[in-house]
């Protein structure tokens, strides 16, 4: 039986009446968020019956509480989604006053529109299911497609991991240097790259590419001046690592001095770890929105999103602005 954590009611730090529960998807991040909030962890048990069905046991009262459930829907995506649905149903039946789903990573976000006939829009289906199961609010980080916020008929707080990455590079001394530029790995990432470039006070460039098949990519052109520069490539997620690795190699082949990659969501499906370690990238910087147990390698640097998530939770609980956390980035 697997035990996960539940944060009990806070008293003097702006968290009174709040309870933070965590599913099995990322217990390490949940513990960090609870520590940032200054709440004491209690008991929640999430286990499975002999046939694989999920069993949830909430072991303290949630009646009248402002409940937050932290559960990224990363791999195993379907198990983590089903666990979230059951948690929502349990808290709704336990008479929680409000239930907020904190999804640092939103699974199925890449299926946000129809590309071919008879394709599902699974990101919308997930949104409908979350609402139907009893969620009153959703908090998430760096959605793959911003329009997913509109799939919900409940409030959605969209957080940004970019400022955390930007602060890291500023601490490394990359701000304002003439030999630094930011790279958007595709046209869809231009907005994210521009905001990071503004933080680092440097120019940005764009890689134009095509995807002949899922998880495969071909670099068509690179727009902008990057010769002799240290390039910081930013994306919302890294899955198999093929896009980032091929983009980095194209930059090096065409005159870049160094390429660093960064993202919010390190999915790192096989063979990503080996591919990135053996690539020309000098460093890969990620956030801990997804549990990386068993996926570490020498070039990987992991930063925590716990302070950001905890701050957002506290602001929501106290009916304060969340957008103020981001300034120009948001």
Image (cartoon, helix red, strand yellow):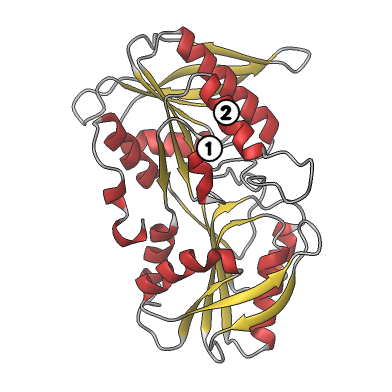
Mark closest to the chain's N terminus, 2 or 1: 2
Examine the image and state in which quarter residue 132 appears: top right
CB contact under 8 Å: marks 2 and 1: yes
Crowd tier of the residue under label 2, counting other residues whose Cα lies within 10 Å: few below 14, some 14–19, many 20 or above: some
Residue 98 placement, left or right of 243: left
Which residue corresponds to the image point at 78% horizontal and 56% vertical from the top-left?
A: 214
- The quadrant of the rendering that contains the C terminus is bottom left
Q: Residue 288, can we see it?
A: no
Along the viewing direction, whichever of 236 and 110 lies nearer the viewer:
110
- The quadrant of the rendering that contains the N terminus is top right
Which residue corresponds to the image point at 53% horizontal and 14% vertical from the top-left?
A: 89
27, above or below 215, in the image: above
201, above or below 62, in the image: below
Secondary structure of the residue carrying tag 1 is helix
Residue beneath label 2, please?
A: 128
Which residue corresponds to the image point at 31% horizontal and 48% vertical from the top-left?
A: 323
In the rendering, at what x and y percent does residue 222 appear? 63, 82
In the rendering, at what x and y percent does residue 6 appear? 43, 22
What's the CA distance linking mark 2 and mark 1?
Answer: 8 Å
Residue 182 placement, left or right of 171: right
In the rendering, at what x and y percent does residue 16 appear? 24, 22
186, above or below 236, in the image: below
Secondary structure of the residue carrying tag 2 is helix
Q: Residue 30, can we see it?
A: yes
Along the viewing direction, whichever of 218 and 234 lies nearer the viewer:
218
Mark sitting on residue 107: none
Residue sticking out furthest to the left: 12
Examine the image and state in which quarter residue 155 appears: top left
Residue beneath label 1, please?
A: 151
């Amino acid at each position: 039986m697997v035990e996960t954590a539940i944060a009990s009611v806070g008293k003097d730090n702006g968290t009174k009446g709040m309870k933070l529960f965590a599913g099995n998807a990322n217990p390490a991040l949940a513990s960090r968020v609870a520590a940032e909030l200054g709440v004491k962890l209690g008991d929640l048990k999430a286990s499975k019956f002999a046939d694989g069905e999920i069993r949830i046991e909430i072991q303290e009262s949630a009646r009248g509480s402002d409940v937050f459930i932290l559960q990224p829907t990363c791999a195993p995506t379907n198990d983590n989604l089903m666990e979230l649905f059951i948690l929502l149903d349990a808290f709704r039946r336990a008479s929680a006053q409000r239930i907020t789903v904190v999804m640092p990573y939103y699974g199925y976000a890449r299926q946000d529109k129809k590309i071919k006939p008879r394709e599902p829009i699974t990101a919308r289906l997930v949104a409908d299911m979350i609402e139907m199961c009893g969620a009153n609010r959703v908090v998430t980080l760096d959605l793959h497609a911003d329009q997913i916020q509109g799939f919900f008929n409940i409030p959605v707080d969209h957080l940004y991991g970019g400022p955390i990455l930007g602060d890291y590079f500023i601490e490394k001394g990359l701000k304002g240097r003439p030999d630094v530029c930011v790279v958007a790995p595709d046209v869809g990432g231009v907005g994210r790259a521009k905001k990071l470039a503004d933080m680092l006070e440097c120019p940005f460039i764009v890689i134009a590419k095509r995807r002949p098949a899922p998880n495969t990519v071909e670099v068509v052109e690179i727009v902008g001046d990057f010769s002799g520069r240290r390039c910081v490539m930013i994306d919302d997620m890294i899955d198999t690592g093929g896009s980032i690795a091929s983009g980095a190699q194209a930059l090096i082949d065409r005159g870049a001095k160094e390429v660093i990659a960064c993202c919010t969501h390190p999915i790192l499906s096989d063979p990503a770890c080996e591919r990135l370690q053996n690539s020309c990238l000098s460093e890969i910087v990620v956030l801990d929105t997804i549990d990386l147990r068993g996926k570490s390698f020498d070039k990987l640097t992991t930063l925590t999103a716990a302070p950001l998530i905890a701050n957002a939770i506290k602001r929501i609980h106290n009916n304060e602005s969340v957008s103020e956390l981001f300034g120009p980035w948001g």
